């Protein structure tokens, strides 16, 4: 009988997923999605191939589960950080900072590169995780208008412009010691773009 990690089957499941996701995160950074194999991930995570296949039948399923896990944790972090601020200007600045800091650490291929690596249904599942982030940005923008912190503009125009600006990897690919300067410049840019009364 295979060894159970943790004190219960649920704890075992969580431990396997945590180990596998840690390895996948590192391998995505080091080698890219195309070079990853389930056997290699299982070996590096110290779990049997059969155990891994019981959780993730193929590489695509593993990537989708990983992104779902990462996205859920990020949405929780973003929600808590934004809700800790009472002023919409501070909320928007917090949103921008977190988006760029996460982008600097996130090594899954963006946009079309990821779309070409996955089947359309899997890509749609991953893309759906942007919805709560977009909803959070929409709420911040609406709150700023309601409190007179910036002028009313169509959020369906502003949101894609802001997310496009914050999704540009070249912003965060420079020297690590310059990241905070870049992040703060982006905060000022977005605040000016919405017409924030800072």
Image (tube, rainbow, N blue to C red):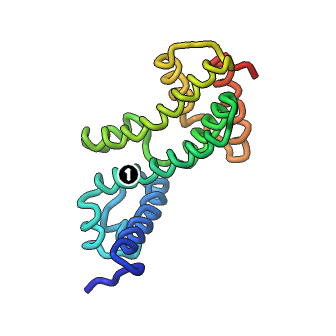
In which quadrant is the N terminus drawn?
Answer: bottom left
Q: Position of residue 121 (x, y in %)?
A: 25, 41
Residue under the image location 73 percent in, 19 percent down: 197
Residue 66 visible, this orientation: yes
Number of marks present in the image shown: 1
Q: Position of residue 155 (x, y in %)?
A: 50, 19
Question: Relative to 5, is 98 above or below?
Answer: above
Q: Nearer the viewer, residue 155 or 173?
A: 155
Residue 19 position by quadrant: bottom left
SS of the residue at dot 1? helix
Residue under the image location 44 percent in, 39 percent down: 110
Q: Position of residue 54 (x, y in %)?
A: 25, 68
Residue under the image location 48 percent in, 56 percent down: 30
Q: Position of residue 157 (x, y in %)?
A: 49, 16
Residue under the image location 55 percent in, 13 percent down: 153
Q: Nearer the viewer, residue 69 or 152?
A: 152
Question: Relative to 106, is 93 above or below?
Answer: above
In which quadrant is the C terminus drawn?
Answer: top right
The residue tagged 1 is: 33
């Amino acid at each position: 009988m295979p060894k159970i990690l943790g004190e219960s089957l649920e704890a075992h499941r969580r431990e396997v997923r945590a180990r596998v996701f840690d390895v996948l995160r590192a391998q995505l950074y080091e080698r890219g999605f195309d070079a990853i194999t389930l056997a290699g991930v299982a070996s590096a995570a110290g779990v049997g191939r059969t155990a891994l296949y019981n959780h993730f039948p193929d590489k695509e399923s593993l990537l989708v589960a990983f992104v779902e896990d990462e996205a859920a944790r990020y949405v929780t972090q973003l929600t808590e950080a934004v809700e800790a601020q009472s002023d919409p200007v501070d909320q928007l600045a917090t949103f921008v900072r977190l988006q760029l800091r996460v982008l600097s650490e996130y090594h899954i291929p963006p946009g079309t590169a990821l779309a070409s690596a996955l089947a359309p249904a899997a890509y749609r599942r991953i893309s759906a995780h942007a919805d709560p982030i977009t909803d959070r940005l929409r709420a911040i923008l609406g709150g700023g208008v309601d409190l007179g912190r910036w002028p009313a503009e169509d959020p369906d125009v502003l949101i894609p412009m802001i997310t496009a600006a914050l999704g540009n990897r070249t912003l965060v690919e420079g020297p690590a010691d310059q990241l905070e300067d870049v992040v703060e410049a982006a905060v000022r840019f977005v605040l000016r773009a919405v017409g924030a009364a800072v």
